[in-house]
Image: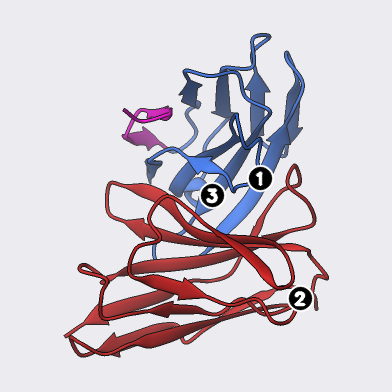
Chain colours: A red, B blue
Amino acid sequence: DGGITQSPKYLFRKEGQNVTLSCEQNLNHDAMYWYRQDPGQGLRLIYYSQIVNDFQKGDIAEGYSVSREKKESFPLTVTSAQKNPTAFYLCASSQGARDEAFFGQGTRLTVV
Amino acid sequence: SQELEQSPQSLIVQEGKNLTINCTSSKTLYGLYWYKQKYGEGLIFLMMLQKGGEEKSHEKITAKLDEKKQQSSLHITASQPSHAGIYLCGADLPPGGGADGLTFGKGTHLIIQP
């Protein structure tokens, strides 16, 4: 079945540590996105990539990094520079800019 | 200021009743997308509207986009417990037009009372 997979579903991190969230899609989509969701905030864009080996900062990129070495993969690293990393992270992909985005099941990151 | 406003923020409806959720933009939209989310899960795509005056329906859910392409409504007829969740509108807004990701509203929490 085609889809977009995020792992892990739950992640705990100690302060000062970097952590990488996985996002894989087998939909052959060109565009991939990372969003952060906080209570009462809606979704906010962290990074996006329209094509392999290219990515752009979104509205809240500080403290995050990404890579797009393969079309199907778009991992997100939450660095120690991110001041409030505890949140629900959602990855999405779409065929093109004006097409509907399909979302993964999310990763809940908690800093302990 | 929020570029995409959703209302109401939360809604409690008795099972079988109709309801409407609104999404308003200060800018003309390129496209408007409705999603549903169960708490702690990913977003499920419902409908996409791109033309002014467009209306789409799926089962008991109807979404409309106004002629000016600045406001959309989501209407649920004869609500059921399965309709409960968070409804989010997302939009392709200028200048990126979607190439730089969707802008989302804060969501509407829908509770269906038996």
To which chain does the residue with label 2 belong? Answer: A
Left or right: where A86 falls relative to A71:
left
Find disc 3 in the rendering and name its residue: B36
**Residue depicted at 37% across the width and 87% down the height:** A19
Q: In the image, residue A16 lies at what x, y percent?
A: 20, 87
Find disc 2 in the rendering and name its residue: A71
Instruction: Please name the predominant secondary structure of the magenta segment in the image.
Output: strand
| Magenta region, residue range | B1-14
- Residue B41 makes an appearance in the image: no
Q: In the image, residue B57 lies at what x, y percent?
A: 73, 32
Element type at mark 1: strand
Query: Of the residues shown, which amino acid type is indicated by label 1?
Result: Leu
Query: Of the residues shown, which amino acid type is indicated by label 3?
Result: Lys
Q: Residues within 10 Å of mark 1 (few under 14, many from 20)?
A: some
**Residue depicted at 58% across the width and 69% down the height:** A104
Left or right: where A109 falls relative to A95:
left
Q: CA distance from mark 1 to mark 2?
A: 25 Å
Q: CA distance from mark 1 to mark 3?
A: 7 Å
- Residue A24 makes an appearance in the image: yes
Which of B108 and B27 lies nearest the eye of the viewer?
A: B27
Q: Residues within 10 Å of mark 2 (few under 14, many from 20)?
A: many
Residue B5 on the magenta segment: yes
Tag nearer the camera, 3 or 2: 2
Q: In the image, residue B43 lies at what x, y percent?
A: 55, 57
Q: Is residue B82 above or below residue A90?
A: above
Left or right: where A4 falls relative to A33:
right
Query: Of the residues shown, which amino acid type is indicated by label 2?
Result: Lys
Quarter of the view holding residue B108:
top left
Element type at mark 2: loop
Quarter of the view holding residue A39:
bottom left
Find disc 1 in the rendering and name its residue: B46
Q: CA distance from mark 3 to mark 2?
A: 27 Å
